[in-house]
Image (cartoon, helix red, strand yellow):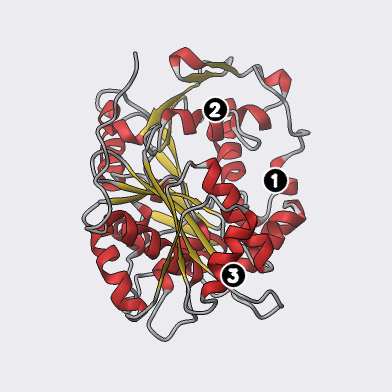
Amino acid sequence: MSTNKIEKMPWEKIARQNQLAPLGDWNVWMILAGRGFGKTRSAAEAIRKWAISGTYKRIALISNTIQEARQVMVEGQSGILSISAKEENVEFYPSRRLLQWPNGAIATLYGAEHYEHLRGPQFDAAWIDEFAKFHYPKETFDQLSFSLRLGCNPKIILTTTPRPLQFIKDLMKRSDVVTVKGTSLENSNNLSPTFLKQLEYLRGTRLEAQEIYAEIVDENPNTLWAWEDLEKCHRDPPHFMNNIVMGVDPAMTSNGDSDETGIIVAGMDGFGKAYVLDDLSISAAPDIWAKRVVDAYHKHSARLIVVERNAGGDLLENLFKSIDASVKIKTVYAHKSKIARAEPIVILYQKKMIFHARQFQKLETQMATYEPKSKSPDRLDAMVWAMTELFSASTPKALPLIWNI
């Protein structure tokens, strides 16, 4: 049943022109837009209008997973249920994965992780959300295309934040595809001040171009890490790890021009796979960031804090010991260049030996944009020190996990 969260006004009166379904003859309406642009609302309003009018009656709703389809496309703040008036009587049946309107129109939810489930059903319309996030974008699109066998003019709405996928570039060249691009800032009147403030921290990065201005940004061959590798390195860590360390790249000053202190928590499982568990980097006075490090050391039951000591010398170890004398510290010197220190870690990422417990936006931006002449990357340095320690030949191998049942 409709949650009726959004006060219903005619969409045509409040939407921007590039949020309305394009005129003319087209098969795919692709909205490449930054976060907060209103992609979800645009597509949900079009689907709602098609269903209520009976123009399309068998609709596929496809997201990366069925859970995401439900949480965003159906029940989200701008999802179909939220934008539907109570008197429209649209019903949602979660166990059957479908929405149903009184006139018989049906929208069924699918997850792209199981795109083969699109084999068999028939549709006359579809909405694909966050297409660039799919692991198998082309396969999902092709399978859906084979399923659009009903009606005389099947249509697809495709909403996504752009990424440099070749298949998206290929779609943009097709004559039956209408591509609409938009930025997050176009919808600034409806975005929170906090969100808009966060955008300032992305200036000059790929994320700004991609996530805010909806530009398709290709890889920079001069950087060590490829965006594609980082975008595929996210994996849930095991619930238990007995080899956790912290990497710290310290800043000894805290004025407006100071670097951040890189603070990375990393661990290794019993199979030799390592994970970035947390990024606690901060711009603060030494006593403040040191307290943060010590607190995290105990929270994660870390065995060691690895600290680059080039800048602070013995002061660093004394700083930690003054807070808690029980912490174990290993100080390291940056004898090699940053590139030389990072290259072995890059190879481990490529071999799928290192993963991130979630998306660490600022760390990953540093990794994918760092070039030899770039500003010193604090988070990256801290991560490299932590991973070097975990994979070092002198590090004890992870012990077999023993569970008490």
- Quadrant in the picture for residue 382: bottom left
Q: Which of disc 1 and disc 2 is earlier in sequence?
A: 1
Q: Residues within 10 Å of mark 2 (few under 14, many from 20)?
A: many
Locate residue 138 relative to residue 30 in the image: left or right: left
- x%, y% of residue 232? 33, 51
Marks 3 and 2, the one that precedes in the sequence: 2
List x then y, in percent, for residue 34. 56, 58
What separation in Å lies between label 3 and label 2 (alpha carbons)?
52 Å
Q: Image height check: is 342 above or below 236?
A: below
Element type where label 3 sits in the image: loop
**Residue 260 visible in rendering:** yes
Q: Which type of secondary structure does the marked residue at label 2 adopt?
A: helix
Please give the residue where the numbered disc 3 appears in the rendered image: 260
Q: How far from the left and from the top, in percent, is residue 243? A: 36, 44
Q: Say which amino acid is labelled 3.
A: Glu
Using the image as rendered, state which of residue 283 and residue 225 is in the foreground.
283
In terms of depth relative to the viewer, which is nearer, 90 or 49? 90
Instruction: Count neighbours of disc 1 (C-alpha within 10 A) and say few if under 14, some if 14 to 19, many if 20 or more.
Output: few
- Residue identifier under label 1: 12
**Extreme-bottom residue of the structure:** 373
Total tally of numbered discs in the picture: 3
Quadrant of the drawing holding the N terminus: top right
Q: Nearer the viewer, mark 3 or mark 2?
A: 3
